[in-house]
Image (cartoon, rainbow, N blue to C red):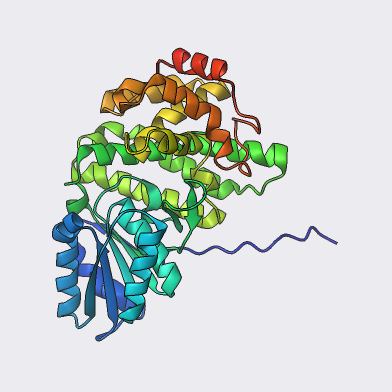
């Protein structure tokens, strides 16, 4: 008899539309998903993103005969996501559109998973790969990690809108993708040492996203639509890698654990992608991967923080985060090991990489 393989279910977005000034395509996207005149649509957006894109999307949908409700998104917490889910359920909404950055899209994904609706991702900023992944990062769980919510049924990414996002958010998206260099290393390590499932295709897709933004870093950092399109497509590909893997493994490793540790110790000080990028320098060094210098050089060139002081986080906090990062998800094996690293080793690490 041959080897019996376990069942591996892959859920991917059905439709992805990327281009300039394409918000008017949203009604046809919903129609392709089975929507029709009279179908209920919930537009989840923040106050700013409602003005930037949400209102425009709602107007196009209403013109096409859809019944539209606006739901204002609050903080990225489980309680807020549950509140949204309750409000959406009362209105009998079939489609939930997350129009905004990572916070809004994560809330919409979680709410959609609670009510059983189809979720459509309409990003207004390219700050991380949650645009297309089935995972949501919300406060209120035992640990600050991502949880499985729902895979977006469609993505409508308007590069005209996204290119107007603050440059810091654009660079954060680059930072999040750089992290795949160590995330895939950690996944392979866990496969070799712990027998964890490893998917080469998903891993290579995630790595391609990282290598793509490193190659085109200057174009992306310029903030023009061409560079933003490259970034957005890479972020979507990274999210799809997670869909294929059935977990966040190809996109989240020790560099993300480090970022989550910083979220505990220094909440709100830096953006997720900024912390992940800094963590990637540190973890590449731990692996003995000489590319840590190249990554640091590119980060400095485009304006991503490479030093603790640039994140407005004390060096001591960086060191502490390195010593507790392995505890964030103890079931997820990484280069940090099961016991983590000592304060002395962490202090040497930040000094050797120039983070201190």
Q: Residue furthest right?
A: 1
Quarter occupied by the N terminus: bottom right
In this orientation, which residue lies closer to the viewer: 176 or 345? 345
Quarter occupied by the C terminus: top left
Q: Residue furthest bottom?
A: 38
Label count reads 0
Residue 262 x, y percent position in the rendering: 42, 34
Instruction: Work out whether 90 lies above or below 4.
Output: below
Residue 195 x, y percent position in the rendering: 72, 44
Instruction: Work out whether 197 lies above or below 286.
Output: below
Which residue shows up at 22% across the image and 52% down it?
159
23 sits to left or right of 310 = left
In this orientation, which residue lies closer to the viewer: 183 or 91? 91
Residue 312 x, y percent position in the rendering: 30, 26
Residue 227 falls in image quadrant: top left
Which residue shows up at 29% across the image and 83% down it?
39
Residue 152 falls in image quadrant: bottom left
Instruction: Work out whether 34 lies above or below 210.
Output: below
151 sits to left or right of 334 = left
> Is residue 43 shown to the viewer in this render?
yes
> Is residue 152 shown to the viewer in this render?
no
In this orientation, which residue lies closer to the viewer: 60 or 44? 44
199 sits to left or right of 71 = right
Which residue shows up at 33% across the image and 51% down it?
102
Residue 187 falls in image quadrant: top right
Residue 17 x, y percent position in the rendering: 30, 62
């Amino acid at each position: 008899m041959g080897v019996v393989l376990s069942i591996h279910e892959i859920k991917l977005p059905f439709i992805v539309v990327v281009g300039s000034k394409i918000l008017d395509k949203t009604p046809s996207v919903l129609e392709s998903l089975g929507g029709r005149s009279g179908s209920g649509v919930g537009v989840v957006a923040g106050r700013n993103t409602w003005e930037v894109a949400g209102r425009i999307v709602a107007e196009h949908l209403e013109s096409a005969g859809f019944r539209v409700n606006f739901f204002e998104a609050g903080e990225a917490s489980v309680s807020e996501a549950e509140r949204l889910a309750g409000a959406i359920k009362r209105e009998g909404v079939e489609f939930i559109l997350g129009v905004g950055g990572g916070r809004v899209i994560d809330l919409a994904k979680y709410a959609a998973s609670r009510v059983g609706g189809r979720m459509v991702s309409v990003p207004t900023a390219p700050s991380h790969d949650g645009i297309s992944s089935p995972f949501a990062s919300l406060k209120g769980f035992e640990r600050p990690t991502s949880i499985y919510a729902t895979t977006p049924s469609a993505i409508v990414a308007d590069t005209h809108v996204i290119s107007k996002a603050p440059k810091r958010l654009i660079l954060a998206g680059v930072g999040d993708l750089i992290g795949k260099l160590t995330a895939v290393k950690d996944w392979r390590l866990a496969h070799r040492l712990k027998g964890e499932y490893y998917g080469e295709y998903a891993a290579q897709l995630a790595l391609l996203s990282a290598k793509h933004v490193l190659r085109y870093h200057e174009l992306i950092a310029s903030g023009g639509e061409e560079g933003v399109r490259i970034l957005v497509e890479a972020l979507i590909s990274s999210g799809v890698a997670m869909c294929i893997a059935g977990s966040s493994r190809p996109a989240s490793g020790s560099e993300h654990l480090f970022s989550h540790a910083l979220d505990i110790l220094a909440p709100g000080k830096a953006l997720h992608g900024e912390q992940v990028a800094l963590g990637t320098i540190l973890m590449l060094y731990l692996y003995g991967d000489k590319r840590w210098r190249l990554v640091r050089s590119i980060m400095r060139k485009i304006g991503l923080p490479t030093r603790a002081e640039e994140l407005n986080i004390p060096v001591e906090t960086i060191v502490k985060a390195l010593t507790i990062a392995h505890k964030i998800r103890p079931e997820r094996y990484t280069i940090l090991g099961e016991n983590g690293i000592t304060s002395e080793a962490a202090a040497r690490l930040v000094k050797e990489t120039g983070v201190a």
